[in-house]
């Protein structure tokens, strides 16, 4: 990293922030890196390959390494291969318009975070840790991409069965799953007890689609809920911000929204309790990596 100045690191990361400012919901890291090469082109050194890794270009690795400070500063979020800015990150972009000042401010917050960790480390160790972190980051992105593509390619009925299996793994009792064909808006009905006499009835709508559910979709689902029902809306494409706000505003209707990432987090959390038949719809095997500085 000796060939990369502090100003250059600031320029690269500010370029990342400039891209993400236009995408409040975040972007896949690969898309960010692709766009960044157009607005902050790599230098000849950055465009070169690593001597011991002839298929790996320095540029993308340097950018990933450079963002570590801003992640620990609370300015940048990385979740399953998607990068997005926090409110603090957007404010920092405006406040520190000079690239070197921007890098210095992020570095200061990183140092503060580092001081609060159980063990410290010198600069050489930090480089080693940073390289390990970026490798882990890329591995996690690749794994999530495969899982995401697998789920998005699943048949609608299998995906519905997967959601039902998750509910069973979470301790709910699935009373009904819609058979193939028109479902009139409700795909699954579940209860908190075997007879369905104690807790609220849970009505689930499952959508396997690429686009986001809008406010109209949320309102249409809420019209199917009784006063004592709890609604669970699952959509692989997620929900618009207005749709999420509409769900949060409800006082008489209880409704929860699950996008693909939230669904997967619940799947991994309750994986061992999901019935084997449904577990085989999305079988997972843990792989362990050293995760420094977490």
Image (cartoon, rainbow, N blue to C red):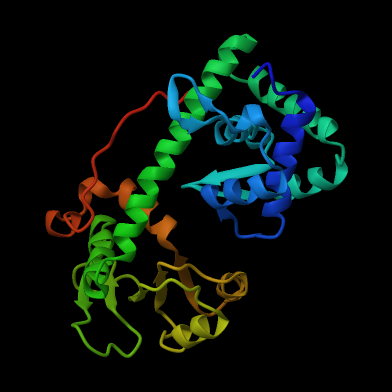
Q: Residue at x 64, y 20 (%)?
A: 114
Residue 272 picture location, percent across and down: 22, 46
The answer to whether residue 97 is above or below residue 220 is above
Looking at the image, residue 264 sits to the left or right of residue 20; the answer is left
Residue 254 picture location, percent across and down: 48, 74
Q: Residue at x 57, y 76 (%)?
A: 250
Looking at the image, residue 98 sits to the left or right of residue 151; the answer is right
Would residue 99 be seen by someone viewing this image from the given angle? yes
Looking at the image, residue 186 sits to the left or right of residue 82; the answer is left
For the N terminus, the quadrant is top right
The answer to whether residue 105 is above or below residue 78 is above
The answer to whether residue 226 is above or below residue 68 is below
Looking at the image, residue 21 sits to the left or right of residue 177; the answer is right
Q: Of residues 238 and 102, which is closer to you in this image?
A: 102
Would residue 197 be seen by someone viewing this image from the given angle? no
Q: Of residues 264 and 190, which is closer to you in this image?
A: 264
Q: Residue at x 65, y 47 (%)?
A: 36
Among the 4 quarters of the image, the one containing residue 89: top right
The answer to whether residue 125 is above or below residue 247 is above
Q: Of residues 138 and 61, which is closer to you in this image?
A: 61
Total numbered labels placed on residues in the image: 0
Residue 127 picture location, percent across and down: 58, 17
Residue 172 picture location, percent across and down: 26, 63
Q: Residue at x 71, y 47 (%)?
A: 17
Q: Residue furthest left?
A: 277
Among the 4 quarters of the image, the one containing residue 164: bottom left
């Amino acid at each position: 990293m000796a060939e990369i100045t502090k100003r250059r690191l600031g320029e690269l990361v500010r370029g990342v922030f400039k891209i993400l400012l236009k995408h409040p919901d975040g972007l896949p890291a690969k898309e960010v890196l692709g766009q960044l090469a157009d607005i902050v082109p790599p230098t000849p050194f950055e465009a070169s390959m690593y001597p011991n890794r002839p298929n790996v270009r320095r540029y993308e690795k340097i950018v990933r390494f450079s963002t570590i400070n801003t992640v620990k500063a609370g300015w940048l979020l990385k979740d399953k291969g998607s990068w997005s800015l926090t409110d603090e990150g957007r404010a920092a972009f405006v406040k520190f318009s000079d690239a070197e000042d921007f890098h210095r401010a992020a570095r200061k917050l990183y140092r503060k975070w580092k001081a609060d960790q159980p063990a410290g480390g010198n600069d050489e160790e930090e480089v080693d840790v940073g390289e390990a972190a970026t490798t882990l980051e890329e591995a996690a992105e690749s794994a999530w991409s495969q899982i995401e593509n697998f789920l998005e390619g699943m048949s609608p009925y299998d995906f519905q069965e997967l959601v039902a299996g998750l509910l069973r793994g979470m301790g709910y009792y699935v009373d009904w799953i819609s058979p193939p064909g028109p479902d009139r808006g409700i795909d699954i009905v579940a209860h908190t007890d075997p007879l369905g006499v104690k807790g609220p009835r849970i009505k689930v709508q499952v959508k396997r689609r690429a686009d986001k559910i809008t406010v109209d979709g949320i309102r249409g689902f809420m019209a199917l809920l009784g006063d004592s029902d709890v609604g669970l809306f699952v959509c692989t494409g997620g929900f618009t911000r207005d749709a999420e706000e509409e769900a949060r505003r409800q006082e008489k209707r209880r409704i929860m929204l699950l996008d693909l990432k939230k669904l997967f987090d619940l799947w991994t959390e309750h994986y061992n309790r999901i019935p084997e038949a449904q577990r085989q719809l999305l079988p997972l095997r843990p792989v362990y990596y050293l995760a420094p500085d977490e």
